[in-house]
Amino acid sequence: MKNFAPELARLKAMGRYRSLSLPEGIDFSSNDYLGLSTHPALRQAAIEALQGGIEIGATASRLLRGHRQAHEELESFAATYYGCPRALFFPNGFQANYALITTLVGRHDVAIFDALCHASMRDGLHAAQCMKVKISHNNLEAFEDALKKPVAAKCNKWILVESIYSMDGDIAPVRELLMLAKKYDAILVVDEAHGTGVSGATGRGETEGFAHDRLISLHTCGKALGVAGALVCANENIIDYLINAARPFIYSTAPMPLQAVLVKRALELVRDEPERRERLAAIKALVARRIPSLAVKSQIVPIIIGEDAAALALAKNLQAQGFDIRAIRPPSVPEGTARLRLSLHVGLTQQDIENFAQALERLLPSGVGL
């Protein structure tokens, strides 16, 4: 058996060793943007479902005995909620992205993807063995140049992006990309992991209002929705094909029925409590005023440090001051761009932000100015 100790030692020497740690301190790190993970209504929904006799586990894949009424109700509700013909529920966003890409993108198709797309998309593309074109981040001209190139008959062109990028916090030009998809006979896939519940006129993401046959959106349920799972929203044929051909869907045990109940309730809360998004917008504005050198484009705010060791040291120092913020290092981000990932959510107070800003100013390494 291979000895992995030398590789672990190398990671430690590079400042890239990772270990698990329990949450401690004021949360500046999680994706619980709307505070739904502790919402009393979700707790009550869980209690009522359990008291009503809902099964703890699905016990089988969806195509065997694992398909339950809770899954069906969630998918029907989600299709109406997101304004799409059909929705399909997966246990998590990584599996959903991987299933979608490995099933739909043929080996002779062309996948045109943003350079900062999530690892789940990249892994799916690698497994799909398709033609791949990496586009510099959010470069519409480069996307169009790639789309102009002809492909063989019966081959599809795919555009893959995130709506809000998980490590940079900037936003994809979804409207313009959908226009390009229509113009060049392509399909746009938008990973709404960090847009779901937060962006769009009513929290339905950056794709809100853009229902179209050439659009597939993926809505992760474990971030702003505070639960777990993912919903793929698309037309009838695509959802039917995923059910029939997506190996991660066919050969995996279905998500817990209770999970589906809670996701549906979380979507209702996003719809019924717009004040949470308003509160988040106010927090973003406060951070932008208090630390004006930070580019606050969304609830995810990167603080670029550069060197791995420096980012790790700053994170540890801030943690010692009572702030739970983590260092993000390669390969999660490009070489030379190690950073702190400041994650904003409705549970933060004005004093939390003031205290954090003061600590950051004291501890920031020389040469990195705010």
Image (cartoon, rainbow, N blue to C red):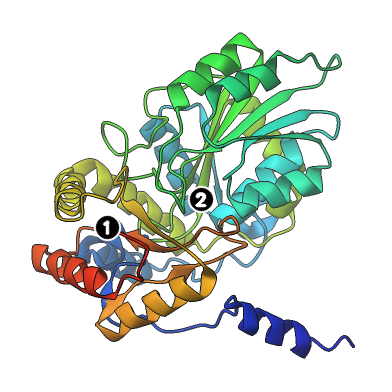
Q: In the picture, residue 132 is in which quadrant? A: top right
User: 221 or 14: nearer the eye?
Assistant: 14
User: 189 or 351: nearer the eye?
Assistant: 351
List x then y, in percent, for residue 323.
27, 76
Local packing at callout 2 (Cα closer than 10 Å; few below 14, some 14-19, many 20+) is: many
List x then y, in percent, for residue 8.
70, 84
Q: What residue sits 62% from the left and 77% below the top? A: 14
| Residue at the disc numbered 1 | 370
Q: Specify whether 319 is left or right of 222.
A: left
Element carrying mark 2 = strand
Comes first in the chain, label 2 or label 1: 2
Element carrying mark 1 = loop
- The residue positioned farthest toward the left in the image shown: 351
Q: Give the quarter of the figure containing the C terminus.
A: bottom left
Determine whether label 2 and label 1 are within 8 Å by CB.
Answer: no
| Residue at the disc numbered 2 | 230
Q: Amino acid at mark 2?
A: Ala
Q: What residue sits 26% from the left and 55% below the top? A: 34
Q: Amino acid at mark 1?
A: Leu
Local packing at callout 1 (Cα closer than 10 Å; few below 14, some 14-19, many 20+) is: few
User: 307 or 194: nearer the eye?
Assistant: 307
Q: Nearer the viewer, mark 2 or mark 1?
A: 1
Answer above or below: position of 134 versus 362. above
Picture disc at residue 157: none
Q: Is residue 67 visible?
A: no
Q: In the picture, residue 305 is in which quadrant? A: bottom left
Q: Is residue 279 visible?
A: yes
List x then y, in percent, for residue 308.
53, 70
List x then y, in percent, for residue 295.
31, 46
Q: Give the quarter of the figure containing the N terminus.
A: bottom right
Q: CA distance from mark 2 to mark 1?
A: 37 Å
